[in-house]
């Protein structure tokens, strides 16, 4: 979160959100509360910025089967990520569908859902997914990585 204020202070980043409905969620809701306030402040009045009250943690507690949530969420501890299935297991719920990996490695496009090794976009510093195999083979390519948003922006400029 510490990089969010500087990110949202840049007009080129705010432009990515203009005219769009934005739904933010984080683990417990605190960072989203702050980030959504910053985003609303930077955008025009009437900007449609929403957040998931209580974060994805509270949502998955309310819907242990995952509800509409798919995949896993990044957490800032040694686990690295948590799935709805893991949260349901801690709540002793038995009827839970297995987690789906919806992310992919930024280098080889293999399914991957763990942010490891602090690989980040060379333009905006957003974390990017890089699988274990590519982390070992491509350490010299760190400066070539771009997040999905920066890739889209580059394609629009061409």
Image: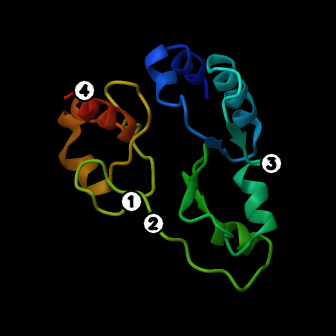
Q: CA distance from mark 3 to mark 4?
A: 38 Å
The reply to whether callout 4 and callout 1 are in contact (CB within 8 Å) is no
Label 4 sits on residue:
157
Badge nearest the viewer, 3 or 1:
3
| SS at mark 4 in the image | helix
Rendered position, 63 above or below 29: below
User: Foreground residue, 49 or 140?
Assistant: 49
Q: Earlier in the sequence, mark 3 or mark 4?
A: 3
Residue in the picture at 44% in, 33% down: 126
Q: Can I make out residue 36 in this image? A: yes
Question: What residue is disc 1 on?
Answer: 112
Label 4 and label 1: CA atoms lie apart by 29 Å
User: Which image quarter: residue 118?
Assistant: top left
User: Where residue 140 sits: x, y (%)?
Assistant: 18, 34
Mark nearest the camera among 4 and 1 is 4
Q: How many marks?
A: 4
Residue 4 sits above or below residue 134 on the image: above
Q: Please report contact status of discs 2 and 4: CB closer than 8 Å, yes or no.
A: no
Q: Earlier in the sequence, mark 4 or mark 1?
A: 1
């Amino acid at each position: 979160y510490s990089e969010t204020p500087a990110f949202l202070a840049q007009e080129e980043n705010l432009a990515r959100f203009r005219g769009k409905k934005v739904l933010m969620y984080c683990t417990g809701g605190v960072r989203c509360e702050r980030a959504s306030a910053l985003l609303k402040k930077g955008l025009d009045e009437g900007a449609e910025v929403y957040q998931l009250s209580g974060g994805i943690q509270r949502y998955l507690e309310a819907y242990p089967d995952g509800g509409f949530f798919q995949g896993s969420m990044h957490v800032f501890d040694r686990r690295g990520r948590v799935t709805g299935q893991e949260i349901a297991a801690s709540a002793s719920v038995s009827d839970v569908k297995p987690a789906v990996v919806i992310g992919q490695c930024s280098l080889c496009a293999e399914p991957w859902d763990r942010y490891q090794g602090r690989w980040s976009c060379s333009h905006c510093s957003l974390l990017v997914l890089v699988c274990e195999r590519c982390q070992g083979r491509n350490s010299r390519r760190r400066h070539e990585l771009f997040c999905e948003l920066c890739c889209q922006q580059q394609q629009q400029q061409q």
